[in-house]
């Protein structure tokens, strides 16, 4: 008889930033669909074109929920501040279409390491070559001194260009009543449980960022999609301790004196992480004037509110408190268990190998240190090749997929690549997601990562050249 064949390992994926299918809100959607589509109901408000700004009942129930979650000091969230969207990604594109003009908007600044899939959205909207990385700051969240210097240089360059060409410094492509204001800059960030680094910005940083945005006519777009998934960082903390998300940038913009009619911040929210990505429902929270103008983007003017039918189901989930219970009784306990399992495995198996946990909550003004979101961020042990090489070997030889630092470079920005590849740059970091696999899968994945690390460390000690060609085929 021939030698027995060993079945290939099942790929374990700590790269995928998706919720487990079993955690998606199937029953809540089913209950909502049965109620919304029941015989005898008037289908006009549900199956026809929805109002441009979104299903009014959802805007009302969403306003109540956001007020309960954030308790904004500037007062309750009101429906006129909300515009229903088809998710954070689609809404980012609509924001750019309505409030930026690549002939005038100088740059898009993206906090690096960045959510890399946002880069194509900016490029599709005409900003190829205009994306710039802004390093994260371990003490605050963003290196605002660096951002200020880049804004100053961009302003000098824009004025000089206009003078040289003898043209006014104003939008060229987007003018007239449909575009009441075009911003000079865009700043994109994920300020709470950031993707990929997991860091949370301090209140001081948030306030300074809003002030800087006002000074330079920048629109800060914050993806606030992970705020609802938080728990005590220390598993020894009180089991029922409730952690409250820090104030959003849009809340700070509203509360600081001098907020202009359109504001300088927009909160990009989504139900993808708490209901399911396929539902394609999200929201913008901003000033009432901003929300109104955003709702008049061409696709909504033609087709009505995006994801209108799904919006009616989400509204019923909020009104019945089903979604709130789903978050508190299902999502947070399960994600918390997975997070603790991941951190425990990292500390027992990877820290001894020289890994360092980079993901951090630096919101030092919070009364209770919290963890949350989907991701943990690690720095590789010294002596290993780049994370890209390690990830390629992990996938090829250990059936383990991990996200590596080079993925999070700001597209087209040579400075971002250079910073990533510095000795302490983020090319030597990996992002691990705990949202997709169950606890046992997470533990096994860390065992595989420890095994591949030991293997690569041994190869390095033997003097093998494992960098050349090792990362081919991984992305």
Image: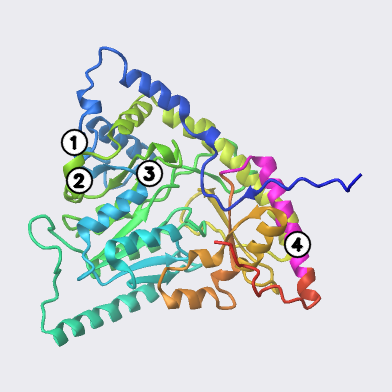
In this picture, residue 332 sits left or right of residue 151: right
Please determine whether, in this image, residue 71 is positioned above or below residue 375: above
Q: Nearer the viewer, residue 222 or 301?
A: 301
- Disc 4 marks which residue? 352
Looking at the image, which residue is at 78% across and 71% down?
459
Q: Residues within 10 Å of mark 3 (few under 14, many from 20)?
A: many
Labelled disc at residue 111: none
- Label 2's element? helix
Numbered range of the magenta stretch: 436-457
Q: Position of residue 179 (x, y in %)?
A: 13, 58
Q: Earlier in the sequence, mark 1 or mark 4?
A: 1
Q: Where residue 396 sits in the image (x, y, percent)?
A: 68, 59
Regarding mark 4 in the picture, which secondary structure is present there?
Answer: helix
Q: Which mark is residue 270?
A: 3
In the rendered image, is residue 247 in sight? yes
Residue at the far bottom: name it: 164
Asked whether 361 or 110 is in front, the reply is: 110
Q: Which quadrant would the C terminus be assigned to in this image?
A: bottom right
Within 10 Å of disc 4 (Cα), the crowding (few <14, some 14-19, many 20+) is few
Residue 365: where, in percent of width, then height? 46, 56
Q: Which residue is mark 2?
A: 295
Give the secondary structure at mark 3.
strand
Quote the CA–CA distance across marks 2 and 4. Answer: 53 Å
Q: Is residue 439 magenta?
A: yes
């Amino acid at each position: 008889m021939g030698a027995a064949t060993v079945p290939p390992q099942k790929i374990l994926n700590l790269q995928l930033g998706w919720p487990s299918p079993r955690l998606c809100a199937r029953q809540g959607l089913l209950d909502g669909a049965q109620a919304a589509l029941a015989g005898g109901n008037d289908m006009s408000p549900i199956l026809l074109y929805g109002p441009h700004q979104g299903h009014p009942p959802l805007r009302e129930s969403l306003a109540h929920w956001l007020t309960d979650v954030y308790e904004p000091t500037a007062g309750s969230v009101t429906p006129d501040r909300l515009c229903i969207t088809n998710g954070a990604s689609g809404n980012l594109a609509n924001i750019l279409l309505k409030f930026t003009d690549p002939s005038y908007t100088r740059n898009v600044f993206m906090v690096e390491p960045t959510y890399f899939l946002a880069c194509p959205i900016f490029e599709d909207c005409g900003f190829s070559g205009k994306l710039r990385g802004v390093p994260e700051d371990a003490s605050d969240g963003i290196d605002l001194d660096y951002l200020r210097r880049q804004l100053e240089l961009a302003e000098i360059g824009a004025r000089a260009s206009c003078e040289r060409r003898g043209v006014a410094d104003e939008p060229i492509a987007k003018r007239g009543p449909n575009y009441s204001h075009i911003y000079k800059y865009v700043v994109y960030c994920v300020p709470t449980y950031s993707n990929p680094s997991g860091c949370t910005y301090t209140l001081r940083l948030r306030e300074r960022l809003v002030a800087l945005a006002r000074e330079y006519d920048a629109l800060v777009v914050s993806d606030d999609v992970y705020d609802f998934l938080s728990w005590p960082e220390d598993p020894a903390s009180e089991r029922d301790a409730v952690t409250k998300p820090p104030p959003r940038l849009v809340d700070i913009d509203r509360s600081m004196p001098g907020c202009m009619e359109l504001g300088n911040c927009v909160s990009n929210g989504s139900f993808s992480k708490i209901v399911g990505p396929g539902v394609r429902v999200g929201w913008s929270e901003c000033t009432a004037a901003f929300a109104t103008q955003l709702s008049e983007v061409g696709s909504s003017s033609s087709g009505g509110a995006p994801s209108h039918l799904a919006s009616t189901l989400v509204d019923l989930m909020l009104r019945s408190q089903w979604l709130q219970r789903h978050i508190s009784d299902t999502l947070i306990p399960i994600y918390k268990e997975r997070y603790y399992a991941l951190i425990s495995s990292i500390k027992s198996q990877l820290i001894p190998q020289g890994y360092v946990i980079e993901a951090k909550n630096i919101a030092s003004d919070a009364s209770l240190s919290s963890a949350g979101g989907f991701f943990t961020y690690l720095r590789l042990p010294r002596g290993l090749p780049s994370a890209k090489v390690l990830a390629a070997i992990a996938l090829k030889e250990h059936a383990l997929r991990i996200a590596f630092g080079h993925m999070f470079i700001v597209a087209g920005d040579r400075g971002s690549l250079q910073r990533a590849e510095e000795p302490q740059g983020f090319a030597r970091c990996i992002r691990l997601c705990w949202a997709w696999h169950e606890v046992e899968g997470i533990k096994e994945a860390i065992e595989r990562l420890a095994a591949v690390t030991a293997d690569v460390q041994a190869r390095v000690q033997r003097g093998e050249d494992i960098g050349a060609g090792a990362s081919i085929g991984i992305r």
